[in-house]
Amino acid sequence: MNHRRDRSIRTGINPQPRTTHPIRSAWLVAVATSIAFGSPIASADDSRLAGPDLGWSVVASDGARRTVSSWSLSTGGDRLERIVPSEVEGVDAGPVRRLPIAVDGASEVGVRTVGRVGVPVLSIGSHLLLQSGERLPGRPDLVDGELVWRHAWLGDFTIDLDTLRSLVMSEVGPPPESVATSNLDVVTLANGDRVEGFVTEVAGDVLVESIEDGSQTRVPFERVSRIDLVAGESTSSSIRVWTRDGTVVDVEALRGTRGDDGRETEADLLAFERSVAEGAGRGEGVVFTREVVAIAWRPDVIMPLDRCEFEVLPHAENADRPWLPAPRRAGGPTPFGAATIELIGPARFRTKVPKGSILSADVELPALMRRFGDVELRILDGTIEVLRRRFSRESPQASISVPIESGDLTIELGPGLRGPVQDRLRFTTPMLLRSSS
């Protein structure tokens, strides 16, 4: 099978995963990892990892949210334990001793995600991005003339082009549009030049085959800034972990554990197990809980709200408004891929969502708007109003959990008591929780 036949399969907005090419080879051999089981991912005095501790946001499978100051994972990995009342002012934090983990079945009201409040996903330099969505910061290294990717606490990886989405040596912006629009792999050089075609080999050189005439271009790896491949998207039904060093990794099992010397308690350490093929890093290890940014159980049932395409319509009380701004992202990357969204009203924002999903978000008036901000939020499931709430200086924040049975979601921002003045709301970590059945 030649690459042109392969390429014809991978067409459309969401191309399928690349099939095996007879001449595609990574020329990469994994070396034995030098990191022993039980090694933490970073030392406790690493100031780069320090940050404000505002507590943790726990999201249940029914979309309900609570903020807690600390937690630990049971040794069986099936529940959160020793959740203590939050010290965050204004947070309803009654003592909760145990919460089950929602792994199977949407009917069980258990923990779906846990994430640090106000801590973004670290944007790092060189990294691998896999089709699964996993991200591995690290560096390439030549071992006996062959290239391997070294991750600080997951070990060494071969670079399998059939599972790779991007290899980034420096942050030079998002992937080139031609990867999606032209269905071409793109190699971006350090000087900004691009070579497009079909990447067949990554070793000391990167080999790119032309789609038009089959000619080959060889680019020395040291000149490469990033490589972006045509790749399908997949989702994980395992457990996804985000850590402070920028790692996003899927694990098969996660549980609380003690350190070998007995000085670290279950609250401080998490033991993980990965189902990995040869040359795909370590299969087991531990990570300090303090280095964790977020955890999602069954990430395949989480759909970030910012993936929806909204139709912006006038509000009934301001039908002649000439300016209808679209929803915009606010802030940097966040766990779960659920970017913060800011809506400006008065307006209606309508979109399609999976039927039977639950909209879960923290909603607030932006800090600069709270003195005069006054806005009424309505959420409709089809034509049925399922939530109505006013946000103002006296009541600027709320957590919402709203079932959308019909699949037709409308978010309406109406003028408050003071009319259409600073009517905008910010949705933090907004996600749609779909049925896991």
Image (cartoon, rainbow, N blue to C red):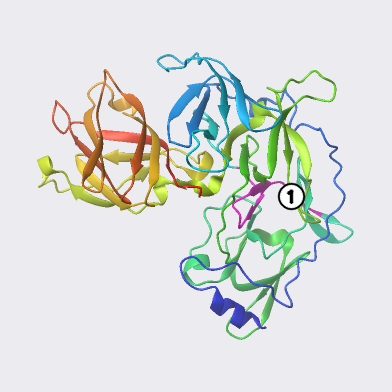
Q: Secondary structure at mark 1?
A: loop
Residue 78 visible in this rendered orientation of the protein: yes
**Relative to residue 334, is residue 370 drawn left or right?**
left
- For disc 1, the marked residue is 275
Magenta residue check for 298? no
Q: Position of residue 32 (x, y in %)?
A: 87, 49
User: Can you say whether 178 is above or below 278 in the image?
Assistant: below
Q: Position of residue 396 (x, y in %)?
A: 31, 23
Marks counted in the figure total 1
Q: Quadrant of residue 339?
A: top left
Image quarter hosting the N terminus: bottom right
Q: Residue furthest right?
A: 144
Kind of residue sitting beneath label 1: Ser
Q: Give me the residue at 76% from left, 70% from top.
A: 25
- The front one of 297 and 311 is 297
Place of residue 224 in the rendered image (x, y in percent of width and height, measured from the top left): 67, 60
The magenta segment is 124-141
Q: Is residue 41 visible?
A: no
Who's the residue at 76% across and 31% down the image? 40
The x, y position of residue 86, in whole percent, is 50, 16
